[in-house]
Image (cartoon, rainbow, N blue to C red):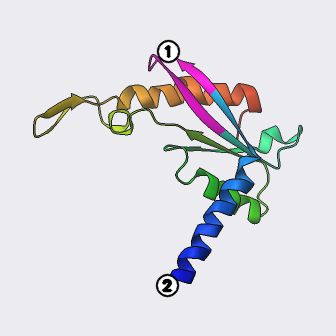
Amino acid sequence: MNTLKVIFTITIVFISFTASGYFKKVTIKSLELNQIREVKIYKLNIGSRDKKTLTAIYMLDEGNDDELLFETAKSLNIKNLLVVAISNIDRGYDFRPPYTMTRGDNVRPGNGKKFVSFIKSELIPFIDKKYGKPS
């Protein structure tokens, strides 16, 4: 069992080191959220003529599975892939709907509607402009 843990840990460390050379962190000033958001962009086998066949995957929770997805796509030799991983500031707030949620004494509305609007009206157009409109 301990051998399996060691192999798993080494694999995760390897994935972290190999993926790190392929991504770029950018910041986007969101008017919708009134925040500055950090986004990690992974590019896989994108040539200058390949923008029409580009596939983009948008992921929430940057740092959880984005590197694993990228490394898996790389090992499968998938071409023209863009993985856009959005960093969280307050996950529970961003993903909750705008109506008030009650859990004990903790009453707080969510920001889900604005977060989706940020993705649709600010992040996707930013990526389209910078990397070409994905298919």
Bounds of the magenta segment: 27-40
Q: How far apart are the alpha carbons under marks 1 and 2?
A: 50 Å
Residue 85: where, in percent of width, then height?
A: 58, 41
Residue drawn at 74 percent across, 27 percent down: 130
Of circles 1 and 2, which is in front? 2
Image location of residue 11, percent across then percent down: 64, 68
Q: In the image, what residue occupies the spot 58% across and 28% down?
A: 123
Q: Which residue is mark 2?
A: 1
Q: Is residue 98 left or right of residue 53?
A: left
Dots 1 and 2: beta carbons under 8 Å? no
Secondary structure type for disc 2: loop
Please tell me which residue is depicted at 89% across the width and 39% down the height of the picture.
49
What residue is drawn where x is 62% and y is 58%? 68
What residue is pinned by disc 1? Answer: 31
Where is residue 83? Give x, y as percent.
65, 45
Q: Amino acid at mark 1?
A: Leu
